[in-house]
Amino acid sequence: MRGLFRWSRKWWPGLIPLAVLWCLAAWYDTVPLEQELAASTAAALKSDVLDKTRIAVAGRDVTFSADAFSEEGRRSALTSVEGVPGVRLVNDNTRLVPEAKPYVWTAQRDVVRVTLSGSTPLPAIKARLQEAAKAALNGVEVVDHTGFARGAPARFDAAVLLLIEQVARLKEGKVTLSDKSVSLAGMARELGGREAIWASLRNLPEGYSVAANDIAAPPYVFQANKDPVGGTLTLNGHVPDNKVHAALVEAAQRKFFGEKVTDNLKASIGAPKGFADAVTRALGALSRLSTGSLEVADREVKLSGDALFDGAANQIRQSLAKDLPEGWKAKAEISVKPAAAPVDASVCQRLFSEVLGQGHIRFESGSATINPDSAGLLDRLAEIALRCPAAAIEIVGHTDGDGDAAANQALSEARAKAVADYLVKAGLPADRFKTSGQGSSVPVADNGTEEGKAKNRRIDFLVR
Amino acid sequence: MTAFLTFHWGWLTGALLLGLAMGWISVVQHGEGLSKKTAQVIALVLVIVVGVAVSRVVPGRPGYWLDLGLVMFAAYLIGCAIGSALRDRLVARQIAAGRIPVRSDPPKSAS
């Protein structure tokens, strides 16, 4: 041992190369050591649930910053870092994520995207909610601005998953969950969406309540467009059920004698009261236009287009507002079609025959009251009569063979007179018309069949 | 510490070999080496430096370099001790075999 002390006094010259070796070791190993420690630390924290984790290594000292979701989680993460082999000191910059009071989560939907904001309690829940939103909103961009906060109410995720389903039913709007209180505002995407949302909200977890539900239903829209060039009447929008659907299409076919009806209607709940009646009457007004469109949105009827002559335009404006059920509003933007060129009597006769070949004037059963469905046809006849102002016109009524001859005679005369009165009311001079009735004496088809009888019940226009 | 030694094994081996060489030489080297007082001062400084290192007062990279230096110095000292012991045993064996004469310590200077 004494020798060792003696020799050790001569060991100092080796310190010079040792110092050189030390410098080289420090030069080459510092950065790789720091990288290895950073990688080991990150690996050690893999199982810890943290937010905003940052690891900075200087030498063998680790500066560890993170937001933990609980005190236990924070301590566990710190222990994990301290246990990494090679770490000398851990500078603890960890903290708990802030607590939110009240605990608010919102989803805002506009035309192109859904924005999630507010708080979520854990990364796993945040990811699950985001996935659920993407799945429910199928193709709509989901922007997630939610942050983390402690203090979420029990079953927060179940409540939010249910609310995300409701967001998918909105066209636009906002859904807010504040603690256990739900508020909804906006517009449902489809008819019946508002009712579906109400029904779903009954499945909220226990303790959750709806503070405000201001979801509006989209307008209940029915549209009809009369295109004289294509000879079509196109029906679009909604009807309450199949029965009303069939009735409206049938009414359209009766009123629009010269047009092919294209039916694009869909059955949907949410129709305003008096829908079928209002639409039927509005279709009657549209049938009197040369070209035009009808839009019914909730309880507002908007009719626009060209009437065949001045008198018809005034009648349509006045009758539309008057005929609609109570609580309905009408807006008529009716102009008058430019008058067609005058023609001579023979052309007028041909035009009457053509129009009456396409449709016939309807009367109430067994009476001389003109059915409102024939208003469009009568306007067409009036327009033709206006084109030959010098010609006298004889209106002749006919009936089928049913009933006794005297009654048929009287009915045919009364019906011819009713038609003449209509034309006079439309603005034509009364002295141009002469009316007569032929009863069932001049049939044009076999009175033995229903089809034949229908053809025999007619009004003829004879231009003199 | 195991991780530290494992990571730096190359440099530590270098320090150990350097120590072995120095220890090997020091046995047969002429001269007195450091004075006792200087050795004591160095020992004192060393104790303080080790104390600083153990108490982890120096932060970050300088702290790491200090640890590295001390561990390399320790490896060097171990190398020196082993080298000196081996050389001493070899010299003793050669003296016993009469291949080299017994060397008396040089006379101390009058001053």
Image (cartoon, rainbow, N blue to C red):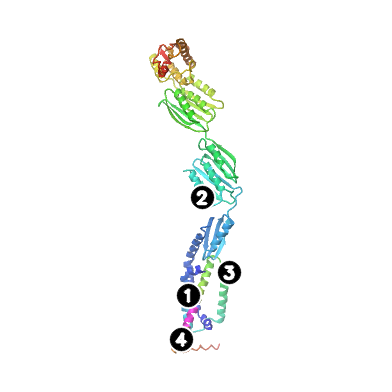
Amino acid marked by disc 3 = Ser
Q: Residues within 10 Å of mark 3 (few under 14, many from 20)?
A: few
Percent position of residue A223, x then y: 48, 29
The amino acid pointed to by label 2 is Ala
Question: Quick check: do tags 2 and 4 share a chain?
Answer: no
**In the drawing, what numbered circle is on residue B55?**
3
Distance (Cα) linking label 3 and label 4 = 45 Å
Residue drawn at x 53%, y 24% is A324
Q: Secondary structure at mark 3?
A: loop
Identify residue for label 1: B16
Q: Which residue is mark 2?
A: A127
User: Which quarter of the figure has residue A437?
Assistant: top left
Q: Is residue A328 above or below residue A135?
A: above
Image: magenta residue range? B78-88
Q: Earlier in the sequence, mark 1 or mark 3?
A: 1
Q: Amino acid at mark 1?
A: Leu
